[in-house]
Image (spheres, helix red, strand yellow):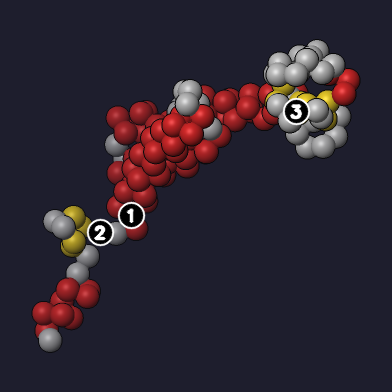
Amino acid sequence: MEMLAQIATSTRILGIDWHFWKVVGWAGNIIFFSRFFVQWYATEKQKKVVVPNAFWWLSLAGSFCLLAYGFWRRDSVFIFAYLFTWIPYIRNLVISRRVARQSAICASCGTEAPPRAHFCPHCGLKLDSMQSPAGTR
């Protein structure tokens, strides 16, 4: 019984001393690593290399957790490694949002036309006959 009580109150699991900041650091690692699976799945699904927005959101969340952990440890190498990574992640999310707003869905065939296209790349319908992804143009 005493052994069970000791295990329940122990903060050492798998040889690791666990506390709040250790959980933040490991969560950051797991979140950051999970973006690999998101990108892999999107690429396999579309049969071409794709980087979905979820990849950038996971990158942002994971790197912020790891940056917080680095500050807690007062590790300058760790801090510098994650201090500026948010810049390209946010930039890619901004670009993605801008492109999505400029894209249009063909009213005839449902194909997404690239930004600034005058005709549907699939059926050739004129851009004036297209609807934006949100349903407004």
Task: Characterize the local packing of mark 3: few (<14), some (14-19) or many (20 or more) Cα atoms within 10 angstroms.
Answer: few
At mark 1, the secondary structure is helix
Question: Can you give x and y, in whole percent of width and height, for residue 46 in the image?
Answer: 51, 29
Along the viewing direction, whichever of 31 and 71 lies nearer the viewer:
31
Quarter of the C terminus within the rendering: top right
Instruction: Give me the disc on residue 23.
Output: 1
Q: Of callouts 2 and 3, which one flags the residue occurring earlier in the amino acid sequence?
A: 2
Q: Nearer the viewer, mark 1 or mark 3?
A: 3
The residue that mark 3 highlights is 109
Write the residue at 18% across / 81% down: 5
Q: Amino acid at mark 3?
A: Cys
Examine the image and state in which quarter residue 106 appears: top right
State the residue in front, 69 or 108: 108
The residue identified by callout 2 is 18
| Mark 1 / mark 3, whichever is N-terminal | 1
Q: Residues within 10 Å of mark 2 (few under 14, many from 20)?
A: few
| Marks 2 and 3, how far apart at CA | 55 Å
Could you say where residue 29 lies in the image, as x and y percent from the top left?
A: 34, 43
**Along the line of sight, the residue nearer the viewer: 72 or 102:** 102
49 horizontally vs 129: left or right: left
What kind of element bears circle 2? Answer: loop
Residue appearing at x 75%, y 33% in the figure: 133
Residue 123 is at least partly visible in this image? yes
Q: What x and y, as percent, mark residue 108?
A: 80, 28
Tell me the quarter of the picture where residue 35 sits: top left
Give the mark toward the camera: 2 or 3. Answer: 3
Which quarter of the image is occupied by the N terminus? bottom left
Instruction: Compare marks 2 and 1 and give the one earlier in the sequence.
Output: 2
Q: Mark 2 and 1 residues: CB-CB less than 8 Å, in contact?
A: yes
